Amino acid sequence: MSRKTWAAVDDYIVEALFEADPALDAVLAANRDQGLPPIDVSPAQGKLLSLLTRIQGAKKVLEIGTLGGYSTIWMARALPMDGKIVTLELDPHHAKVARSNFERAGVSERVELRVGPALESLAALGAESAGPFDLIFIDADKPNNPNYLSWAMRLSRPGTVIICDNVIRDGAVLDGGGHDVNVVGARAAFSFIGGDKRLDGTAIQTVGAKGYDGFAIAIVS
């Protein structure tokens, strides 16, 4: 199977199961126009995050890595009216684009965007006793996966769902002797989840418009 086929199947999924959504289309267009890297989750993956948020019954969500806010909007829309998502972004330009996108999508009241190094923002959330969060989505710089997972545990409760994106890396996760920092970070996520007895997790391999990758998902016991 080729990436072209995977992308075509993604298009079919959207056509068959999703209603037209001009606001989300405009978000992706704005991200492209503003020069953001094209690394947003796919629409099918965004819908999965939305469904997981609803299945979890989440009212408080933490996202580590905002980019232009595409995934943020999918999760924010799945929250109840009194729900809230805190999303963390390093790059001020990305954050500016994301804020505009939140306004465009009508979710600004449910989103709190914090700008700066994620580990500093996480430490601030800890100092503020901002947790526990019901669902935590990690999709930022991969070498820091174990640090983000460590903070996720501090900001969670029994039953919190933790999702860590991009952990398969075209199968390169099998390379235990390589020096690609993103692969090292992916393997570190597996080591963390597998080594913490408070976590019960698995991983799902994905193919689609974004190629061959996947995510780890775990629940805190």
Image: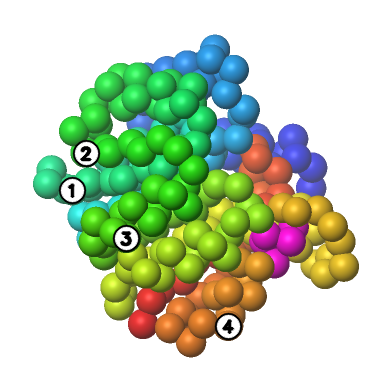
Name the residue beneath numbered marker 4: 195
- Please report the residue visible at 54 percent of the width from the left and 12 percent of the height from the top: 33
Name the residue beneath numbered marker 3: 126
Q: Are marks 3 and 2 in contact (CB under 8 Å)?
A: no
The first of marks 3 and 2 along the sequence is 2
Specify the quadrant of the image occupied by residue 191: bottom right
User: The residue under label 1 is which amino acid type?
Assistant: Gly
Q: Position of residue 7 (x, y in %)?
A: 66, 36
Relative depth, front residue between 34 and 22: 34
The first of marks 3 and 1 along the sequence is 1
User: The residue under label 3 is which amino acid type?
Assistant: Gly
Q: For label 3, count other residues whose C-alpha is less than 10 Å away and answer few (under 14), some (14-19) or many (20+).
A: some
The first of marks 2 and 1 along the sequence is 1
Asked if 107 appears above or below 142 in the picture, the reply is above
Residue 83 shows which numbered tag? 1
The first of marks 2 and 4 along the sequence is 2
Which secondary structure, mark 2? helix
Residue 10 shows which numbered tag? none
CA distance for labels 4 and 3: 23 Å
Q: Are marks 2 and 1 in contact (CB under 8 Å)?
A: yes
CA distance for labels 2 and 4: 34 Å
Range drawn in magenta: 183-187
Which secondary structure, mark 3? helix
Q: Position of residue 15 (x, y in %)?
A: 48, 32
